[in-house]
Each structure stands twice: as C-alpha cells, then as structure tokens.
Image (cartoon, rainbow, N blue to C red):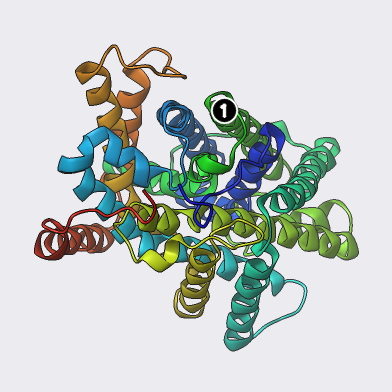
Amino acid sequence: MSTDHKLERGLSLGQATAINMIDMVGIGPFVTIPMIVSLMHGPASIIPWLIGALLAYMDGMVWAELGAKWPEAGGSYVFLQKLFGERKGGRLMSFLFIWQTTLQAPLVIASGAIGFANYFSYLIPLTFLQKKMVSGTLVILLVALLYRNIKNVGKISVVLWCITVGTIIWLVLSGIPHFNAAQAFNIHFDGFNSTSLLYVAIGQASLKSVYSYLGYYNVCHLGAEIKDPARNIPRSIFISITGIAIFYLAMQTIILGVLPWQTVASSDFVASIYFGQIYNHTIAQVATLLILIIALASLFSAILGYSRIPYAAALDGNFFSIFAKVHPKHKFPHISLLAVGGVGFIFSLLFKLGDAITAILTMRILVQFVSQAIGVIAWHYKKPGEERPHKMPLFPLPAILCIIIWLFIYSTIDYHYILYSLGIIALGVITYFAFMRRKPATPVSP
C-alpha cells in the first residue's frame, strides 16, 4: 500500500478500550433509561438491560474472532467480503453494508448530537431551533477535535474515558446511602394484559438497551490502527462490554432504588433529577455538565470509527476514490472524516431522537449483525483448518444465540421501520446489480 493511503498503528490496548467504552456510554443510557422503565412499567426494566448485556457478549465473540483475523480499517465492510467471498456474495454484502452505512452512520452521529442538545436544555432552556443549533455546532466541534494524528486522538480518548468512568462511579456511589432495595427490586408484570404485550414491550425495551450498548465493536473499524491487533482487539471488546454492563446494571438499579419508577419514566433529565434529589440543584447542574462531556466523548469515538468505513471501501475500489485519501502529515482519512461529519451535521438538523434510535438499529440488524453471525458459522464449517488468532468459545452457540436475540428484537419493531429497512436493502440490491456487478473492483493502491 502506498504511503498516500496507509494508516498508522498507533493505538494501544488502553487507548482502544477507552475509545470503545466512551462510544458505548455517551448520552445513550441517560435518555433510554426513562424509555425502558416506561415500557416495562417499573423495575422489570432490568430484564432488557440483561438481554442487552447477553447480546453484547454473544455478538462481541463474533466481532472478536473477525477483528483478530482481519484487523483492517472498515470493520464489517472487510468481514462481510471475507466471509461471503470477495468475488461472489461478499462483494454484494459489503456493498449493502456501505450502502446502509451512508445513512446509518450519520444517524448515529445525529442521535448523539440531538440527545446532547436535549440534555443541555436542563442547564439552559432552549427552543427547538436553539437545540438544533447546539447539535449542529457539536458535530462541527468534534470533527475539528478528530482532525489530528491517531496517537493524539488516543490520548484525548483516555482523558474522556476517565471523565466517563468517574461520573458513573460517582452516580452509583452517591445513591447507596439512599437506596431502597424493596423499591428497586419490586419486579412485576401487572401492567400487561397479555403475553403478547409483554413480548413486544421486552423487545422494544431491549432495542433501546442495545442502542446504549452499541460501540463494543468500534475497535474493529479501527483495525488498521491498533497495535498487536490479534490480541488487543478481542481484549478491548470484552473489557469494554464487561465494564459497561456492570455500570449500566448498577446505574439502572441504583436510580430505581432512589427515585420512584413513575418519576424515572416521565423524566427527560433522569440523571440530573437523581443528583438533585440526593444533593441539590447546583450539584445536579455540575452532574449534567459531566453527562454532556460523556455525550461528547461518545460522539467523538463514533465519528472516529465511522470515518474509517468509506475509507476502507474506497481503498478497495468500491466507493469514490477520493475517500481513500490520507492526510499527508497526520496519516488519517481526512476526506472520509469530513464527509461523515458533514452528513451527520445535516441529519442532526432533520431528525428526532426516538426516530433516529429505532431507524439506526432496524437498518443494521439484518445486513450487519445477523449476516456476520451467519457468515462466521459458515466460515467455520467451510474452512475448519484456517488459522484463527482468536477462536470463539463454545462455537457455534454464541453466534446462534446472537442471531436469535437480534431476530427477536427485529420482530418487535414497528412495521413502518421494518418496511423502511427492507426498502433500503432492496434498493441497494437493485443498485448493485444495475451498476456495480459488472464493474471490476479496482483497488486505489495495489
């Protein structure tokens, strides 16, 4: 690969883990906890968080095996090609991935920016237009922060990780003296008139919890920039999932042990109200500011990871070649970064938070998560003797469980979003066969 397109392996295990963890937290849990509690009518909301943790571990095993085997920029773009055949179905699958990523990645950025602006209004009441100004400005600021060498990005990530972990630990420890166990563990299903309603509620609540867990795979998007990737990518994934799962379960439990679930379900600023209940309004404002920094950190990591996907596709000859350009001095894909950030900026002005969260996962479940799990199973059976730097424990059980849970969540999503996701996939298939199938892939730099 020519130096014009080569990335630098500058991220250590600690920095890679920090990038993963700050991507996973963000504004997600602070806006989804009320949604999940409302859907589950109280402390039974712990169930979707447990389902989300289980899914993250099972899917994380898929990502760990693939990331260790093919540590390249782009993550799923590379994995789908390798799993389904670079000259056969893999080219279609990787095209569908980049096709849906052009919409889904900016939606992730937009959802985080919108959540940031909504939470910011606890400190300063904002009109709808002002919220949009805040969300758009945030995206611009983050692109400017990321416009630098990967080693410096890694250092910034560690600082943001320290703030993220410190804030969550403070949140959990603050509630212990005020914790009411009977209130937190009063799990019941009285509010559901039928099993089908409970099934849908658990599925939709799990969708929200999974949104908060997303990011455990971000290190795979940065595979070409990780030191000793065969060891550090799997380690980073499992350290991240374990740490965040503990934080989320503790945070959900402690909040419901301090505040009545009805208060949690109806609050737009649940963490701020929680700190205000324990301390006072001034401390609540300080805590809100820290939560906003966590939200900023998550978007910082997400934009970083997603900017490597168009770069990988362009490098492979399956996307506009300009996206393969690397900054001549700092060695990062600056055109791809600017493009992803630019579309994310536009989407942050157009979408609402709830719509963005649902649309994000609906589009990704079939093309990315389910397809990868199926591909890993097929790969094991077709090429049992192929070298695997990290092999999935208890194969194929984790991959099978991963597929089952993803399809369960998908089956409970509103049919409008399902039709929308299927339409995006169908349009991508038509586009591929109309324009791409006969076009030979021409790598940018042999």
Q: Residue at x 26, y 31 (%)?
A: 375
Classed neighbour count for the residue bearing mark 1: other residues with Cα under 10 Å, few (<14), some (14–19), many (≥20):
some
Give coordinates of residue 49: x percent, y percent.
Answer: 52, 38
Which quadrant would residue 101 be assigned to in this image? bottom left
Give coordinates of residue 287: x percent, y percent.
Answer: 81, 57
Which quadrant would residue 202 be assigned to in this image? top left
Left/right placement of residue 176 relative to residue 69 reads right
Q: Residue at x 81, y 43 (%)?
A: 166
Which quadrant would residue 391 be assigned to in this image? top left
Q: Is residue 114 above or below residue 85?
A: below
Give coordinates of residue 156: x percent, y percent.
Answer: 75, 52
279 and 400: which is toward the camera: 400
70 and 393: which is toward the camera: 70
* Residue to which mark 1 is pinned: 238
Q: Residue at x 76, y 42 (%)?
A: 165
Give coordinates of residue 180: x percent, y percent.
Answer: 74, 36
The answer to whether residue 6 is seen in the rendering is yes
The answer to whether residue 110 is seen in the rendering is no
Q: Look at the numbered disc 1 and give the secondary structure of its residue.
A: helix
Q: Is residue 420 above or below residue 350?
A: above
Q: Residue at x 18, y 54 (%)?
A: 440
183 and 138: which is toward the camera: 138
Query: How many marks overall?
Result: 1
Left/right placement of residue 161 relative to residue 374 reads right
Amino acid type indicated by mark 1: Phe
Left/right placement of residue 34 relative to residue 158 reads left
40 and 391: which is toward the camera: 391
